[in-house]
Amino acid sequence: MQDNVKDMTTGNPYRLILGFALPIFLSQVFQQFYNTADTLIVGKFLGTEALAAVSSSGNLIFLLVSFFAGTALGAGVVISRYFGTREYDHVSKAIHTTVALSILCGVFLTVVGVAFTPTLLRWMDTDPDVMPQAVEYFRYYFLGALAVVGYNNLKGIMNALGDSKRPLYYLIFSSLLNIVLDLLFIGGFGWGVWSAAVATTISQAASMILCLIHLCKPGTIYQVQLRKMKIDGRIMREIIRYGFPSGVQNSVIGLANVIVQTNINSFGKLATAAYGSYAKIEGFAFLPVTSFTMALTTYTGQNLGAMEYDRARKGSRFGILSAVLLAELIGLGIFVSAPALIGFFTDDAQVIAIGARQAHIEALFYFLLAFSHAVAAVCRGAGKAFVPMFIMLSIWCVLRIAYITTVMHFTHELSFIYWAYPLTWGISSVIYMIYYHFSDWIHGFEK
């Protein structure tokens, strides 16, 4: 097997999944440092209004980026499947198609993000006091959208081939670079909130370049070559088939979160700052679960591509159980230590109290969120990407928005917004449980 490429169709499934998930977890930790460093340093050096400005754009950034991140998942499914069947020519075509597609998507996202920033933030009912700084942060962030999309796609290629270590090394470097630049730009030079976005862009570009250098390495099945850089029609259709549903799924989750953010913003800048601070904590808390779900997609795709059905079932059960247990342990920890954790981002007692209230409502239900994400990952790896798309669209988007709209019509109480999350997590988990146990997902590629 070539450099850092891992075949997950042989060997102990538990050891393979754990060995693959651990580097992903560590890399996700460092990736989370990007925006968390921005939030932490901005909140401490520039105050509550600047913290609210960064927080107000978080879900909007996720909405616009998440569709392309979902497409990267589809590309990973295609690559891992062909790798499992040993069709290396198709692996190469899929990689070059993915790289070309990521360039086009990155340019498109840059134009949309920069051009429509004020309109989107006004649509989200952003507090007028923080609007100027939010526009600055958002626009500078999206000037680096090509780096964001490019890195996610290149990392997805490496993960699909079983290499989860190199993306970790690159992220460690770029995350530390981001923190140094944040401290230099804001703490040293005294620049505004926009400089935090510039630091993130530079750091993301560094990690993308490092990934690209590795993938251009000669003599490997994954070598990226300029002369092969084109979109293959057949491969593109497969990526769309498996990636478009994941992209839509991510986008509808992002849209629902934007609606939630809009309602949160209506309670003022303190609620916005609290919501953004809690989101960073939850982002870190859920990284172990995300690591298992990414491992599950690659593991399932490779084993079903090789028609190793029993291995796929065995590994999926282990991954789902691990994700659920980890999530609940983390939730208990956050429930107990919420005020102290929110206090890392701000010294404002009101912001800390509001953020802790959200944690006390949501954290004990993380096991439901983990179960839904884990089964969705198995579905994507099995070529059943439309299943999680429909479930997320109907429950995490339509039902969540309907619930919030109805509740806010009768009472303007912040806690009811927070309850939208555990309620929809629970309903989706029941549906996923039924699907996992009673459908024939194991033969998804064949059908």
Image: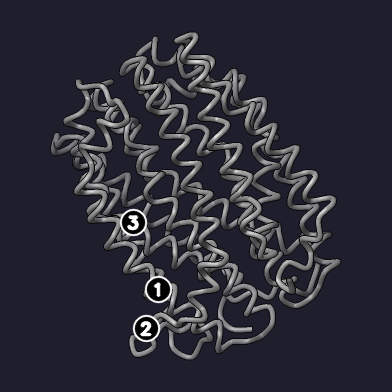
What secondary structure is found at the residue carrying circle 3? Answer: helix
Residue closest to the eye, 295 or 94: 94
- Find the distance from the CA under tag 1 to the CA under tag 3: 16 Å
Question: Which numbered marker is on residue 99?
Answer: 1
Quadrant containing the N terminus is: bottom right
Q: Which residue is mark 3?
A: 204
> How far separated are the C-alphas under marks 3 and 2?
22 Å
Mark sitting earlier along the chain (2/1): 1
Lateral position of residue 242 relative to residue 374, left or right: left
- In which quadrant is the C terminus drawn? bottom right
Q: Which residue is mark 2?
A: 229
Front: mark 3 or 2: 2
Badge 1 amino acid: Val
Q: Quadrant of residue 21?
A: bottom right
443 in relation to 432, above or below: below
Mark 3 nearby-residue class (10 Å; few <14, some 14–19, many ≥20): many
Q: Which residue: 70% across, 64% down?
A: 382
- Are the residues flagged by discs 2 and 1 in contact, CB closer than 8 Å? yes
**Residue in the image at 34% along x and 90% along y:** 227
Q: Secondary structure at mark 1?
A: helix
Considering only vertical position in the picture, is 348 above or below 311? above
In x, y percent, where is residue 390? 61, 48
Q: Compared with residue 230, is residue 189 higher up or lower down, i.e. above or below?
A: above
Residue 40 % position (x, y): 35, 32
Q: At x 49% / y 24%, what residue is drawn?
A: 341
**Residue 168, position as x, y percentages in the image:** 49, 59
User: Residue 205: x and y, percent?
Assistant: 30, 61
Q: Is residue 308 left or right of residue 70?
A: right
Q: Amino acid at mark 2?
A: Met
Question: Callout 3, which amino acid?
Answer: Gln
Q: Is residue 89 above or below residue 136?
A: below
Choose top left, top right, bottom left or bottom right for residue 88: bottom right
